[in-house]
Amino acid sequence: MKWLTRITYIYLALPFIIFCMGWLRLTIVLPIIAVILWVLWQYFNSDQESKNEFPSRITVYLLFATGLWVFLSGVGGYTFQNWDHHWRNVVLRDLINYPWPVVYASPESGPIKMLIYYVGYWLPAALVGKIFGWGAANFALFLWTWLGVLLVTLQLSFKLKTSALKTILLLVLFSGMDALSPLLFAQEYPTLWLPIQHLEIWSGNLQYSSFTTQLFWVFNQAVPAWLCIALILESDRQEHSTAFQISQKIFIWSLCFFFAPIASIGLFPYLLLEWFKRIDFKSPFKNLRFDALLASGIIALVSYLFFSSNSAAQERGFQSVAIKDMLVFFLLDGGILWLLLAPLKWRDPRWALTGFLLLVLPFIQFGNGRDFVMRASIAPLFYLLLMTGEAIFQNTGPRFYRIAFAAILIVGALTPLYEINRSVYRSVEYYFILDESQRAQPPVEPVTHLNLAGAPEKEHLGALTADGIPTLKFMTDELSKNFIANVRQSLYYQFLSPR
């Protein structure tokens, strides 16, 4: 549908335009925005309806299902927020309270400390917050996330040729079989009781997050990454030349890089695969749209120069993982499902690529902690969900396969259900059980460090929202280095920043 594709493009491009106006010099901003708007205009004019359009409607039930999912995620602060929201909330708060770009210290000599992070997702809400305050910003963030999830659901439902309600149900409940780990490997945590624990940490630094976990913990990366992948898939249905489609996909990928650079790394091999499948090697660049490539290059270059100002982004290498541990992790967190798809999808090169990525990602270290494994896997997990959905909803293969898929998905569904149940439990406790004297208050004094997360169900007891950091300005702990950087010597500060 034309309107759906156009709204999706605007949803993804608007934050980058806002970023340019706040983080770049005026002499650079105007031509960049002009190029972006021109490319969007060209896409809108050339957008065509598919001949095989699959009907889908936005119903009250769909709005309720997507809205409830976002509501329970903690986005907006209306229900329990997991530990990662400490950092999500403070980024939004500093985007509201400080001028753009956000500078914490700018002495004549010495470190110039600036917020260097992929802030794009928060910018529309932060703009609302600058005018109407913190409460309005959180409500805008909730609506923005709701809209993003709704767009993803609709785009994916067209690709799966099924109803949007079935699609959102698949998104919410799709996961690896983490629930089997407490049964197969005796551990103190997680266990299956109480049913509010975080099942996905059973394998230490190895974790492939369910889509519900992605939304509940890192919505700022997950939602735009899902939407970019869905839009790339949608471009296959449009009746354009191969070169036009490839130009579109590169442009969409560059926006994914702006919102979620680690997730875009996991998406990039699929882009290369499409290029190898479709391109004419005698003239590989024939008919590629120069304006789209120019806009893509600008978005990627500006984003890279900004992100690379943070030295935390420079840490990369390989990590040692025992083969036995890796195989167990792979099989439980998607490998069995991937193998089950083999008789149906082995001719689809995306199936082979998905399995390859899920096997090799755990060996790659980028930044600190386990973020790379969790976030770079967003794209292969999305394609795994897509292929599974096609097998189920399009009645592909014998009945045995559909029964096997259903059994695996039912076991896997426990992981997101535990996440949802924790949100419900802690929210009900806060609103209906705790009295005013038992409710914790967020700190108002400067905070220099934040304790590492323990069991999520015991995080910030007595509080609904994760507001342990009033501002990043005074933070000195290791994790804060992911957000604050000395930019004095960076190319971004020297050539792009409006200082």
Image: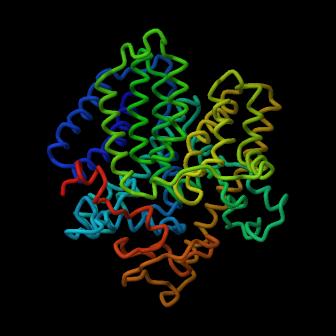
Q: Position of residue 63 (x, y in %)?
A: 47, 48
Assign the C terminus to one quadrant of the image. bottom left
Q: Position of residue 252 (x, y in %)?
A: 41, 34
Q: Position of residue 406 (x, y in %)?
A: 75, 41
Q: Which residue lies furthest to the top in this view?
A: 282
Vertical position of residue 119 compared to residue 357: above or below: below
Q: Which residue lies furthest to the bottom in this view?
A: 437
Question: Position of 73 compared to 133: left or right?
Answer: right
Question: Position of 389 compared to 483: left or right?
Answer: right
Residue at the spot x=50%, y=84% of the render?
Answer: 439
Evaluate whether residue 211 shows in this view: no
Q: Position of residue 226 (x, y in %)?
A: 50, 42
Assign the N terminus to one quadrant of the image. top left
Q: Residue furthest left?
A: 27
Color scheme of the displayed model: rainbow
Vertical position of residue 460 compared to residue 364: above or below: below
- Relative depth, front residue between 13 and 473: 473
Residue at the spot x=71%, y=56% of the render?
Answer: 414
Residue at the spot x=42%, y=14% of the render?
Answer: 241
Evaluate whether residue 317 shows in this view: yes
- Relative depth, front residue between 105 and 341: 105
